[in-house]
Amino acid sequence: MNTHGPDPDDQYDDPGILDDHPHTPDTNALPEPPHPINWNLLSAQHLEAELLELNRWVDWLRHTYGLPASVIPSYWHRHPELLWELSALHLHWLCAYDPEQNGSAPLGWHRDFAEARHRLRDWVTASGTRLDRDRPTRQTTWPGEEPQPTHDESVITDRDADFVQYVIDQVNERQAAEDAFYASLDDRIDPATDEVRDDVLGPEGG
């Protein structure tokens, strides 16, 4: 993968990258067995793959079940509470429809899906995002904390274009963090032994 993140001219020219099979989730896109996803710990490469896969599945879900924006809004990707909830629902779906699963598992998924829709409505209401307008979820400032900045609503004109830009930004940010981490390790490696020296601080150590 390019260390500078995905090039939008190279990787996102293909309109099918977002919606190659809009009504059919691609269960083979990620080769590993279903596993919990910790979005905070993914590498830049895996972050890109997981975001694209989740986007395909959410698009299939909203079309298949006719879900309104009050359950899955167009800018769900810009609200972590919605991303984590939908990611968990996706994982549950993958497990329920795994060929090795028992026949009653899909029914269990639909039961849990009903509960998840109630939570999603609560998240959407609290976040303030709507079908055609969005603002970041407001944060409560605890005593002693700096007040959180206020944000005005923005008009949503092209959801898919925004999602592509979101993926690019997130991957670049994660890649920069990885590069900084490995650079700090280079500063601590003893050239004579190739071992990490505990007595040498990286850039973050001052």
Image (tube, rainbow, N blue to C red):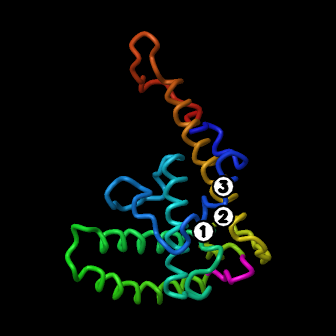
Label 1 CA crowd tier, 10 Å (few <14, some 14–19, many 20+): many
Q: Which residues are magenta?
A: 127-134
Q: Amino acid at mark 2?
A: Phe
Residue 77 badge: 1
Magenta stretch prevailing secondary structure: loop
- Looking at the picture, tell me which residue is in the foreground, 196 or 58: 58
Give the SS element for disc 2: helix
Q: What residue appears at the point 58 percent right and 47 percent down from the top-left corner?
A: 174
Q: Amino acid at mark 3?
A: Asp
Q: What residue appears at the point 43 percent right and 84 percent down from the top-left corner?
A: 116
Above or below for 188 versus 123: above
- The answer to if 129 sits in the magenta stretch is yes
Residue pointed to by mark 3: 14
Residue 181 % position (x, y): 53, 36
| 3D distance between C-alphas at marks 3 and 2 | 14 Å
Residue 163 badge: 2
